Image (cartoon, rainbow, N blue to C red):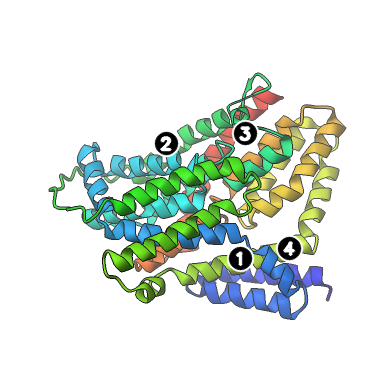
Amino acid sequence: MTPKIISLIIFIVSYLLFIFLPKRRTHIAVIAAILLILSRVVSIKEAFLSINWNVMGIFIGTLIVADIFMESRVPAYIAEIIVDRAKNTAWAILLICLLAGFISAFVENVATVLIVAPIALSLAKKLKINPTNMMIAIAVSSNLQGTATLIGDPPSMLLGGFAKMNFMDFFFYKGKPSIFFAVELGALTSFVVLYFIFRHHKEKIKLLPLEKVKSWVPTILLVSLVFLLAMSSFFDTGFSYMAGLICMIFGIISILWEKFVNKGSILEGLRSLDWETTFFLAGIFVIVGSITITGWVGTISRYLSGVVGENIFLGYTVLVFMSVFLSAFIDNVPFLVAMLPVAISISNNLHINPSLFLFGLLIGTSLGGNITPIGASANIVACGLLKKEGYTVKFKDFVKIGLPFTLVAVSAAYLFVWFVWN
């Protein structure tokens, strides 16, 4: 068999096993990555380069900061305030999702989930409810709003670099409402979906102010990290290294603070990190990288160009919803990189403004990952955090929230872009 066929078989088998054996997903991802190397589909160097080390740095570094943030009792304190101020439990959950969405517009999605998760988990413990649906809602909310600005998500950064768009172009581009407004319309409609999911939590619980904040230092570190992550996007426009480096530096600072101020054990702190999700992420990057390296993404791109022909609406619709479907299973960064030239080519053939296809491609690619627990790094991290708390997320349970949320959000944004940019 050719490397191209082997990569496809390993990819399909791996993702099927992720669905049916979720508790063994890390073993499956690592074994699949090793098989790809042993079968010479990818070299060790290609496997290494397939891993997005920037995202890995963000994950590990922010996880350390989030851990000491949790231990400071500030998340539990914030959870008390949210519950007491909210109309009922449903609105408390929705407010946390809004908070995640707001942060995600300026900070990478994985970091956002790790920042907001301690608050959600503290709230769930105080209300004695299962945090699974809440964590899924936070993940999909962060993935959605990350698309709204140039600095919120790697695909947005990639599109901005490709189309030479600056920060303000995501709000108004060539005199017309841009990506931000399409995403916010999607957010508004998908918020209704989240309310429908959580509406049965009508109980109003008044929490007694029991929490005593141990230290505000972790909060200061976290706020500083958020600010620097937002600023880094202006300097590292290719999302190549700076965000991960900043997170790792803050992680080291957090470890040292825990060691010398709280007299904690560095070894114990490192051992308690979510290494299972870390290795799973690395394995996923290698599996998806093999699909890109062996040319499958390019094959799909060329096929799409042939299907579109001269029909603008058909081309736009196929591009958006094919991107939604594929990015539910394939990492959106390599897919978007491969599809951007295709979108330009199709636009040139049809003699239209390429912004229509480029914006539609970004929406479909970025939001499609919300459908499945393996469609976006933020989803994987959210599921990993839940597993650490003793909750296993089933594939169907994630899809039950992710699919309606995605379809509603994508449809609203898709129509907005069509009517504004056609």
Q: Which element carries disc 4, helix, strand or loop?
A: helix
Mark 1 and mark 3: Cα distance apart in space: 29 Å
Q: Label 1 is placed on what type of residue? A: Ile
Q: Earlier in the sequence, mark 1 or mark 3?
A: 1
Residue at the (48%, 45%) spot, across then down:
228
- Quadrant location of the C terminus? top right
- The residue under label 3 is 414
Q: Quadrant of residue 317?
A: top right
User: Looking at the image, do the residues carrying marks 2 and 1 touch, with CB atoms under 8 Å apart?
Assistant: no
Res. 364 in view: no
Label 3 element class: helix
Determine whether 320 is above or below 113 in the image.
above
Distance from label 4 to label 2 (Cα)?
36 Å
Q: Which residue occupies the extreme top position in the image? A: 175
Residue drawn at the location 69% of the way across and 25% of the way down: 421
Instruction: Count residues near mark 1 (Cα–Cα under 10 Å), then give few for <14, some for 14-19, many for 20+.
Output: many
- Left of 306 or right of it: where is 335? left
Q: For the residue labelled by badge 2, is the local secondary structure a helix, a strand or a loop? A: helix
Left-right relation of 7 to 58: right
Q: Amino acid at mark 2?
A: Val
State the image coordinates of residue 6 (x, y, percent, origin top left): 76, 73
Mark 1 sits on what residue? Answer: 284
